[in-house]
Structures are given as structure tokens and as C-alpha cells.
Image (cartoon, rainbow, N blue to C red):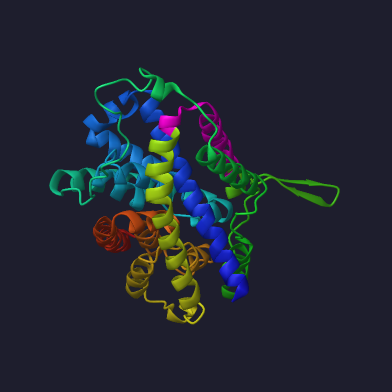
Amino acid sequence: MWHLLVDILRNSILITGLVVVMMMMIESLNIESKGLFFKGLRKTKIGQVVIGALLGSVPGCMGGFATVSLYTHRMFSFGALVAMMIASSGDEAFIMLAMIPEQALILFAVLFVIAVIVGIIVDRFAKSPAPECEEGYKVHEGHEESDTHEHKSRHFGWKRISMFVALAVFIGALATGQLGHDHGSHEAGVHSHAEHSGHVHQDCDCGHHHEEGRTFHINLLSEDWMNVLFAGLSIIVLIVLIFASDHFVEDHLWNHIVRKHLPVIFAWTFGVLLVLGIGLQYIDIDRWISDNTVLMILLATVIGIIPESGPHMIFVTLFAAGVVPFPVLLASSISQDGHASIPLLAEDKKGFLWAKLINCAVALAAGFGAMLLM
């Protein structure tokens, strides 16, 4: 139990930290460009959907966190949010790229096309359920941010210093891998399942170099590289904290993001992960598995509702082992989106429910459609 709580705490800090960093980045870009950076994006919902699908296609949950941040502050449409959730495969994307790279790339392309089509349809017929964020990403009217001494002054008060120290610690934890996920057990599960069932796929020599009996592993598809990338983005926010005005730091970063959003996101993230972590200790998903493709598609879709990376790995494992066909993996990938939807659950519960409902409907349609075509 202690190990579980520590792991949940680490994941909660990671998710909350990434979301907050994305919010601060977006806030900074919007203010520094005086609203011009996102002005063009607001005019085209199709463009929002395409970008949402592209962000969802990024392995891991980071693109999803960015999309949720933009959606909850009315920068992205509801269709763009749905497109991201359809295109996203969560942390399982890293495993698929490592274990079944060719099939993974085909799957990601199919998910992207479906995501864009569904996102456009959703924006055409559905109204966004997102509540208005009154203090959201906006430039104050009636003056430029740099016109007055109040908006130009810069002092290193306790709020700025607190955010600076917290962000510096977060960057260090990201760069050193202290907040990373451990996928070793999943990868081992793929191999053992493949060997047990007699379906062993030909290994891909992706970045493996052999020399005199020694093996060097260079995995550019590891989420460790994504953590380093986000550490770099966090450094940019750190620089912003040093040079930004008191007004921006206190009103936009502290009062809006840190005080309003951070506690809610962290509380919901920790609570959801705790419930799932304890619940999954008593649920053996392996026992639910059947050779019936129809049942497997239904099961994959239902399990996809769980906003957690982990339960969905069973379908990646079974597909890599040749036990289940592509339609099952397709349905699972559409329905699930890893941790990306947890911040959405914290910020907009109605939007979360509607988006998940649409995702499940699309997952079932795509899964059964692919089954009939194969």
C-alpha cells in the first residue's frame, strides 16, 4: 500500500505539473502576443480540430494536457477536444512504437483520420459544454500590459520565489526521471504472452547496436525523451518568472493558475488515481479475456473509459502476441486516452462525460466496421 501511495503521489505531481506548465506557457504566449497568437486559431474550428488531433497523436499524455488546457479556456472547440481524445493512445503509444512499430504507425494514421472527421462532425452539430473561464487567457482591455508603471514593475516577492523554487524542483525531477513511469513490466508482459501463446513477432532492430557480444539500447521512442523535452519547456517558464512583471506573475500565474486551477487538478488527479489503483488490485482483467472478437471489442471500449494508463496494456499485449485482431486494438485506442482526460474531469465534468460517450460510440463503430472489412 505504501508503494502504491508513493507511485500515485508521483503520478499526481507529474500530471499536475505538466498541466500547470502548459497553462503557464499558453498564458505567456497569449499575453506577450497581446492575444494575436491564438486569434487566428479561434476563427477556424477545422484548424482547431486538426491541431487537436495532432496533439493527441503525440505519444504519451502531454499533447492531451495541452489540448485540455486550451479547451477549458475556450481556445479550442469541443470537436478539437474529442479529436485529441480519439487520436491519443496515452502511454501505450510508447510501448506500441517499441514492440510493433509498423502496426503502430498504421494505427496512429487511422486514428488521426478518424479523429479529424469526428471532430469536424461534432463541431458542426454539437455545442461546447465547457463553462466559461472568467479569468482565462485574456489580455486586459483598455490598456496595453506595458503601458503603466504597475504593469512594468518587477519585484521578487514570496509568490514569485515560491513558484520559481517549485518549478525548479519539478524540472530537476523531470530531467532525472524521478517522475517517470516504469513500463518494464508491460514490455515483459508482451514477450511472455507472446511466448506462451506461440505467437512471436519478429523483433525489430530499432536502435539496437551489437558489438562483441554487448548490446547497446538507444531508444529514441522512450517517454524519457518527452520528459526531457518538457523539462526544457519548463525552463522557458522559469525564465518568464524571472523577467515577467508583478502584474503578470500575481494576476495571471498565481491568482489564476496556481490558486484556482492547481489545487483542483491535483485533488482530482490524486483521488482518481487512488480509487483506480486500489480497485485494480482486486480486478483481474486477464480473466475477462475471450477469443470472441465481438466481446473483446465491447470489453476494450468499456475499459477505455478508465482515465488511466495500464489497464489498456492488456490489449496491446494480446495484439502483439497475435491473440486478438486489429479491430480490438483499434477500439481500445479510440476509447482510451491515458491520463489526458483526468484534468478534464477536474475542470469540466460534463465535457468529460460527453467526450467519453462520443469516444465509446466511435470506438464501437470503428471496431465493428474494421471487423467486417477484415
- Residue depicted at x 44% and y 41%: 22
Between 140 and 76, the residue placed more toward the observer is: 140
- Residue depicted at x 54% and y 65%: 8
Between 10 and 206, the residue placed more toward the observer is: 10
Q: Is residue 248 above or below residue 304?
A: above
For the C terminus, give its image quadrant. Answer: bottom left
List the single residue furthest toward the right: 212
Q: Is residue 374 left or right of residue 206?
A: left
Q: Is residue 177 left or right of residue 125?
A: right
User: For residue 242: magenta?
Assistant: yes
- Residue depicted at x 40% and y 46%: 56
Residue 357 screen position, x and y as percent: 25, 62
Residue 353 screen position, x and y as percent: 26, 61
User: What stretch of residues is rendered in magenta?
Assistant: 226-248
Residue 313 screen position, x and y as percent: 50, 65
Q: Quadrant of residue 197?
A: bottom right
Residue 193 in sight: no
Q: Is residue 333 above or below residue 279?
A: above
Residue 358 screen position, x and y as percent: 24, 58
Q: Is residue 48 left or right of residue 9?
A: left
List the single residue furthest toward the top: 147
For the N terminus, give its image quadrant. Answer: bottom right
Q: Is residue 312 left or right of residue 182?
A: left
Q: Is residue 265 above or below residue 298?
A: above
